[in-house]
Image (cartoon, rainbow, N blue to C red):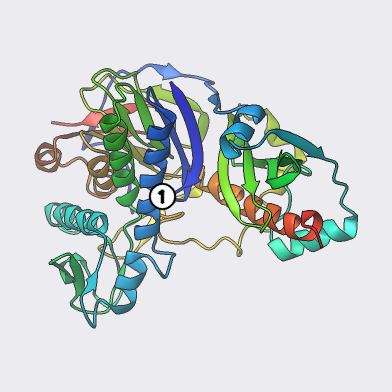
Amino acid sequence: MPRFDAALWIPVAAASMPGVAFATQYLTVEQAQRQLYPAAERFAPVALRLSPELRARIEAEAGAQADAGEPRIWQALRGDTLLGSFMVDEVIGKHELITYAVAIDPHGTVRGVEILDYRETRGGEVRDPRWRAQFVGKGPRDPVRLGEDIQNLSGATLSCRHITDGVRRLLVLHRLALKAP
Amino acid sequence: MIRRARPLLGTIVAIAADAAPAAVEAAFAAIARVHACMSAQRPDSDIGRVNRGAHRHPVAVDPWTFEVLERALDVSEATAGAFDVVVPGNGARHTDIVLENGAVRLRRPAQVDVGGIAKGFAVDVAVDLLQRWGAGAGSVNAGGDLRFLGAKHPAVNVRVPGQPAQSVQLPLLPYPAYATSSGAFGARLYDPRTGASGAMEWSVTVAATTCLVADALTKATALLGPVSSLLKRFDAAAFALDANGRLHAPAG
């Protein structure tokens, strides 16, 4: 398999960039609120306390655990009309922390996903149990699939999967804990 | 400069552009269209329909899907199958794909996966759109498939395989598009000629005028080594980065 064949390549001088940790803020929470709900007049925070039972049910139905606690939630309102929910959540990639926002309309449909913050780490967080926990039970549930793990540029793929898992979990949370009965 | 990032194409797509917000929206919409047309995981995508029925009857596809397959066959021929969108099995290979009149036919049952080239194509259509909307500077980055807008761009850093916090700066090149194939984070590179896959403890970066070419040629170059006739034909440059962070250019 693909071995580095030193006979085919010659070393060239290149600047080494040690310890560069990449971080970008794409949108603040307020900017994301305005972008996803341009018609909203105000955003009312929702104080949500999930019972352990409900949290377990959400995780079971979504097939995904929360990476970093519960999301921050707002209701987007125009007058007294509910336009939808706005949620801010965090996921952990293999070497980055990503904050993202999801807009879910009152029918439970995703209207948009925006990444707010993307922060790479220098490795210190690897000591955090949350970082290590992400690899627990990852083996057989993560089959190597064409176009995903193989032959793709790696790195961001895991983050994307975690965002997908996160959005699915927020949709279940919306259905079970936020939607009017 | 507007900066936005969204989860698309199985990765995080980041766009930076000195353009109107509507232009950035249009660019994301184009990328979403590529995803909808070409995801092998979606049964209703062009590729999903090709995989189910194109061995029985021609399957009409979106012009973008047709274009990606045309370009993929071009690279397959030039690399003698070291790049191939046909998944190995039943002896099927790129020569079993027939493209005519906007439709795809397969000479035998086969599975097509354009994951190794569609991401680069998506970056290209997004860049084209942004430029048409008047953007003069910026970049589109789909998880390491990267293309800059405008004549001048900053130096590109490539992560050292296995040491994500370390990177090496490529020399400044007159190419706007870059793609890297790497075995970092446990990803494996596979050989479409045999179906075998293996760990890769180094990475290949290809610079080219389009991201589609850069994307396709990184895989071929990782398997074949740098082939000067290939790089010349597609107007591209290749680099290798070993696990110790030493950058290499093609010998000879």
Q: Position of residue A22 (x, y in %)?
A: 53, 25
Q: Is residue A9 above or below residue B30?
A: above
| Image-quadrant location for residue B115 | bottom left
Secondary structure type for disc 1: helix
Q: Is residue B17 visible?
A: yes
Q: Chain of mark 1?
A: B
Q: Position of residue A62 (x, y in %)?
A: 69, 61
Residue that extends furthest to the front in the rendered view of this protein: A79
* Left or right: A55 as drawn, with respect to B211: right
Task: Look at mark 1 in the image and give the residue it sits on.
Answer: B32
* Left or right: B182 as drawn, with respect to A38: left
Q: Residue at x 28, y 43 (%)?
A: B218
Q: Is residue B252 above or below residue A103?
A: above
| Image-quadrant location for residue B59 | bottom left
Q: Position of residue B61 (x, y in %)?
A: 26, 65
In which quadrant is the N terminus of chain B drawn?
A: top left
In which quadrant is the C terminus of chain B drawn?
A: top left
Q: Residue at x 30, y 18 (%)?
A: A13
Q: Is residue A52 above or below residue A44?
A: below
Q: Position of residue A152 (x, y in %)?
A: 40, 49
Q: Is residue B170 above or below residue B224?
A: above
Q: Is residue A151 visible?
A: no
* Left or right: A85 as drawn, with respect to A181: left
- Nearest the viewer among B179 and B43 is B43
Q: Residue at x 42, y 55 (%)?
A: A150
Q: Say which amino acid is labelled 1.
A: Ala
Q: Residue at x 77, y 60 (%)?
A: A58
Crowd class of label 1 (few under 14; some 14 to 19; many from 20; radius 10 Å): some
Residue that extends furthest to the bottom in the rendered view of this protein: B56
